[in-house]
Amino acid sequence: MNKEYMVSNLKIAVIGWGSLYWNSRGLKLKGPWNYDGPQLPIEFARISEKTPLTLVLYQNAPKVQTLWNIGDFSNLNEAVSALATREATTEKNIGFYSRLNGSCRCNAVPEVIGTIKKWVETKGFDAVIWTDLGSNFFETLGTELSEDSIYHYVNGLETNEKVTEKEYITKIHPQIDTPMRCLMRIKFGWRSLTEYQQGFWLNRNIFLVADEIELKKVKREEYGQGTQDTDMLIFTKALEMLVDRDGKILGETLKPRYGIWLDAANQAANQYENNQTQKNITNNN
């Protein structure tokens, strides 16, 4: 790097959208993540060794608001090297922009550099770094990225790979809500227990929220299949809220202990998300 990059005591931001949020893994950060990062086109478009399908910059994706943190680095050179080590990649796959001389690297989706520069200027940072990996979906599978190709790829994963993908999907910050994330959550019912605890729609009029939640195997009579061990969500201090179509709460019912089959809960949540997706499409058109 040029000597300008060796200047110390810089305020260097790190932009994140995936696993950095819950696992910085050796990357020194100064505080908690902030949620007003630049809006960038991010999507599940890269196949990797550790997680089958990961979030990367993707030119054709809708923009989502990313996260950011301040790194504890001596200079920009150290920052780029540290992020490359954390991401198990080479430094050429780490994007950066420095206000010292306006230098930058932005190869995955070059068009986003303008957005990033404006964001850095607004925040007053000296520099910023991010993971500059792009899509390899077509190169790896020989098919374009689409809802159908994503579904068939994920559906064909081995069980342990699906577990890894589910963990990734459910740990990502909620604001990184890309179309493909929504697809996988709906098709495979991939939600964290925390999401159920925070609340979900049982139907279009009833919203359920609870203090605590656990997942248990409970025997259930399956038609034509006898008794099966089936996943059930057990809510402690569950509150059922009757809500009208304008969002006004009409009444509340507190249930000390409440159980609902996981597949039924997923179906209800999926229906609500599908309705919201259709509503967003209609509003955007």
Image: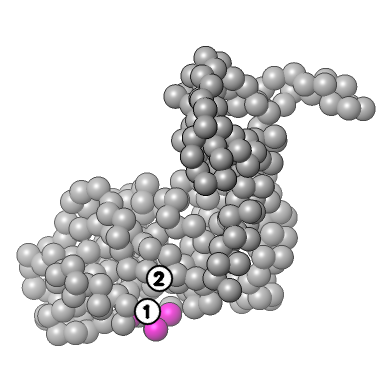
Q: Are dots 2 and 1 in contact, CB under 8 Å?
A: yes
The local secondary structure at tag 2 comes to strand
Q: Which residue is mark 2?
A: 40
State how far apart marks 2 and 1 are (Cα). 7 Å
Return the residue nearer the eye: 5 or 251: 251
The local secondary structure at tag 1 comes to helix
x then y, percent, for residue 111: 39, 84
- Taking the magenta stretch, the answer to whether it contains residue 112 is yes
x then y, percent, for residue 82: 26, 61
Residue plotted at (63% across, 72% down):
145
The answer to which image quadrant residue 45 occupies is: bottom right
Query: Which three-letter amino acid code belongs to the residue tagged 2?
Result: Leu
Q: Is residue 83 visible?
A: no
Return the residue nearer the eye: 274 or 170: 274
The answer to which image quadrant residue 128 occupies is: bottom left
Q: Which residues are magenta?
A: 109-113
x then y, percent, for residue 205: 61, 38
The quadrant of the rendering that contains the C terminus is bottom right
Crowding near the residue tagged with mark 1, few <14, some 14–19, many ≥20 C-alpha atoms within 10 Å: some
Q: Which residue is mark 1?
A: 112
Magenta segment, prevailing SS (helix, strand or loop): helix
x then y, percent, for residue 42: 46, 67
Return the residue nearer the eye: 64 or 240: 240
Crowding near the residue tagged with mark 2, few <14, some 14–19, many ≥20 C-alpha atoms within 10 Å: many
Vertical relation: 53 (above or below) 171 = below
Query: Which three-letter amino acid code belongs to the residue tagged 1?
Result: Val
Return the residue nearer the eye: 181 or 140: 181
- Taking the magenta stretch, the answer to whether it contains residue 111 is yes
